[in-house]
Image (spheres, grey):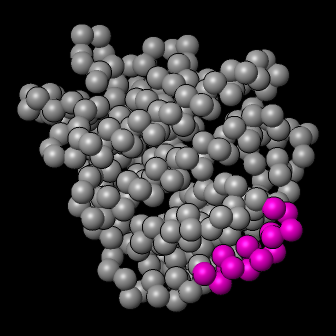
Amino acid sequence: MTDAPVTTDPNWIFLKIYLGEAVDRMDWMIAEVARLTARRDDLRKWFFLRYIDEDGIHVRLRVLPADEASADKIRADLIDSTADRLSRIHAQPPGDYAPMVSLPGFEEQIEQVTAAHNDVRVVEAAYEPEYDKFGGAAGMPIAETLFFRSSEIAARLIELDTDGALSRKSLIPRLMHETFEAFRPGTDPATFWREYSYYWLGARTPAAEDWRDRFAEKAADLAADGISPLAPHGTAQGKFDALVSDWRTALDAAAADYAALGGQAGINAEVLAFTFAHLMNNRLGIASLEEAYMAALVEQAAEPGKEAA
């Protein structure tokens, strides 16, 4: 952390919404949170993340009131509203999202966590921005605006996926691709996504190489079937294009705002591209192994001679 103030704005409200054993209803809770925030006209920004800490699996919700004078009322309203949703969460049908790849024993590990932390509750916490990643006090508001847009887009995609209108799996590689294109790190895209994939595999280990071989086989199968990981397929092209356009618009605005800061924020384009891509994937509920797989697909599309759109 830097010597910047504790937060870019002291009025941010931070709630941890613990789901207990109802982790398979997280998409439902996120959709509810998005509706709660979207219908308020007294917020400047909001964003969410999926998270696990020593107290269990939860949704982290942060909101910024438009007016400091309304902060206490907003805080009380959101605590009451999210507590009400938690009281009804077990009555909701479980989400049907299933990862394309998962580690052996992954579901058992989740069950162990939820068994140890099975109480649902809302906890208020202090928001501590990650200044070192996002350009210090000058860059943090830019990141928070992109967090806001990312959360809006993720919530829309989760709802479309839940309704069967558009699979998040079909869109994630393109969202990752657009993130790189907006921030344009100095490295070439294939190398960037290769290293990204290795990062989420834990390092260049024999086990990681085995997974990478499997990813390459799957990418080859998709190519043989004429499927690009960066292009829509099926009947949802309009929805696909709209979400991609909104994401790229938000990314370009953030990249331009960071560029306007010049060297004063100590910005690293590679760190920004990596982190913003990962945070969108987090919001969409992608586990680390699946994220490594998605990165491998984007890497394959970026290889010389391969179609990248």
Stretch of the chain drawn in magenta: 67-81
User: Residue 245's image quarter?
Assistant: top left
Q: Of helix, strand and loop, which mostly describes the magenta segment?
A: helix
Q: What residue appears at the point 78 percent right and 53 percent down from the top-left corner?
A: 128
User: Residue 257's image quarter?
Assistant: top right
Q: What residue appears at the point 55 percent right and 13 percent down from the top-left corner?
A: 186
Residue 65 picture location, percent across and down: 75, 62
Question: Which quadrant is home to the C terminus?
Answer: top left
User: Is residue 125 part of the magenta span, yes or no?
Assistant: no
Relative to 123, say whether 195 is above or below: above
Residue 109 picture location, percent across and down: 42, 67
Q: What residue appears at the point 51 percent right and 68 percent down from the top-left corner?
A: 35
Q: In this view, does 200 lie to the left or right of 97?
A: right
Residue 226 picture location, percent across and down: 11, 29
Residue 4 picture location, percent across and down: 89, 41
Please state which of residues 193 and 32 is positioned toward the viewer in this rendering.
32
| Farthest left residue in view | 225
Report if residue 64 is visible in the image: yes
| Farthest top residue in view | 305
Report if residue 111 is visible in the image: no
User: Is residue 75 part of the magenta span, yes or no?
Assistant: yes
Question: Number of marks in the image?
Answer: 0
Q: What residue appears at the point 75 percent right and 34 percent down from the top-left corner?
A: 139
Relative to 32, say whether 10 is above or below: above
Question: Which quadrant is home to the N terminus?
Answer: top right
Q: Is residue 204 left or right of residue 52?
A: left
Please state which of residues 154 and 100 is positioned toward the viewer in this rendering.
154
Q: In this view, does 306 lie to the left or right of 38?
A: left
